[in-house]
Image (tube, helix red, strand yellow):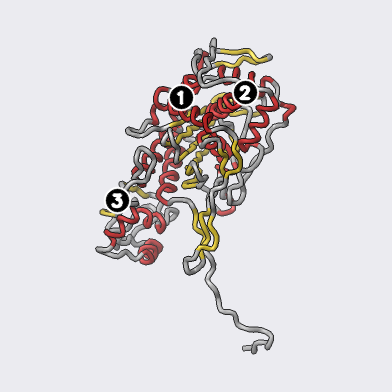
Amino acid sequence: MASMDKSERLVEPKNGNSVILTLDSVLQYAMDEELKNTYNYYNASSTMGVLIEVETGKVLAMSSYPKADSNTKVKNRPITDLFEPGSIFKPVTASIGLETKVISPNTQIYSSGSIRVDDRTIKDHDGVPISGSLETIIAKSGNVAMVKIAQMIKNKIFYNYLMNIGLESKTGIDTYSEMTQKLFPFKSLTAVKKSNVAFGQGIAMTQMQMLMALNTVINNGKLMKPYLVDRIEDSDGKIIKKNQPTVIKKVFSDEVSKANRRFMEAVVTRGTGQAAQIKGYRIGGKTGTAQKSGIGGYQKGRYFSSFFAFFPANNPKYAILVTINEPKRTGNYYGATVALPSVKNILSKLIEYKRISPDGEVGGKKDDENDEKKVAVKKVDINVVKEQFNKGIMPDLKNLSLREFLDVFPREKYPNLKINGSGAVVDQFPKAETKINRNTTINVAFK
């Protein structure tokens, strides 16, 4: 062996830092499963969803389906794919109208069922007139009223608000590959274009941009920067850097935001999103169904179906947006039918898992804290569990918490997983030491 040069010296290896994400493994799993199931049931082209903390912009779950079959094809659709939002955009138009004072919460808006704008006719859904207060318009998702509100707002002011809510630039989320497109030029904001944008057509953005815009509407008008990295720790667990919530700008007043929260709660209590009701909880939301555009205009039978929700409606802590791209199950393409059930299921899981009270507070002890007492009876060696899964042997999972299980379970190796309940493992199939493979159905019960 050649001797070392005198100028050279040995440097002992040093452990690197750890990046701790904001993603919650339990909620991420719930999002993954819902998007996969909805994709399969509706034979969709793709599905995507994001769950955030309203006041901080912290991302708790973010996913899309189908998954890439190789690392070279990985695509984070919520920050790469552009879509037209449809009616989920209407609270933005309502907010601009209220902020500029061309309307008030008590303004009555009449619709005959359609309105003529230059050479185009814009209709309410199925041509059925939707008239009344702004709360009724949002609850029933009127198109004509949105057009009338937009017509009252000066073009330059309307355009500036679109930029102010983040549709001109990337959200700034701390991960790679975020995409966006420039907002259409101001000179192209014709009467027809402006009317279409008012109810979410003729404008495209990423799902993350749309979620943060809607979050601005409900979060006392504050546009937040979303983030995925919670903190960076050294090998001893010392925090090197910690992310803090960032308010990009204040777009709407507290009063305008409060009014819109009330309007969107009406969507769930008496409007198009009634199926999102969760007993004992005040949920706000907005349905959206946007026909896809293509060469020669809008394409028949091709839609983006979305549902946005938040809770508690009076003081939001959590917000979620799920979008289904081109659902193909016959006759089912409305956001209330296609996207809403997944949103409700994820919110229900969030409430159960974090033991959230109707006022939005996390109640009792978290699963991991309760599980520590249970695990004291039998300490689970995470490394052994991981090693056995990798060897094709079913490990003994008893007393493993749901979070711990999801952190070590290799889903790509064993795709047929069924989970029931939350808390710690009380039962499993197959039993410990059983040989397993990709085709094995694994059932795990938690309590």
Q: Residue 227's spot in the image, x, y percent?
A: 54, 49
Q: SS at mark 1?
A: loop
Q: SS at mark 3?
A: strand
Q: Nearer the viewer, mark 1 or mark 3?
A: 3
Q: Nearer the viewer, residue 199 or 443?
A: 199
Q: Which residue in the structure is indicated by mark 1?
A: 331
Q: Which residue in the structure is indicated by mark 2?
A: 196
Q: Which residue in the structure is indicated by mark 3?
A: 446
Using a 10 Å C-alpha cutoff, classify the residue at mark 3 as few (fewer than 14 neighbours), some (14 to 19) or many (20 or more).
some
Q: Nearer the viewer, residue 35 or 413?
A: 35
- Give the quadrant of residue 379: bottom left
Q: What's the CA distance linking mark 1 and mark 3?
A: 37 Å
Q: Residue 438's spot in the image, x, y percent?
A: 40, 54
Q: SS at mark 2?
A: helix
Q: Residue 290's spot in the image, x, y percent?
A: 55, 27
Q: Quadrant of the N terminus?
A: bottom right
* Residues under numbered marks 1 and 3 in contact, where contact means CB atoms less than 8 Å apart: no
Q: Where is 422 relative to 148, above or below?
A: below
Mark found first going from the N terminus, 3 or 2: 2
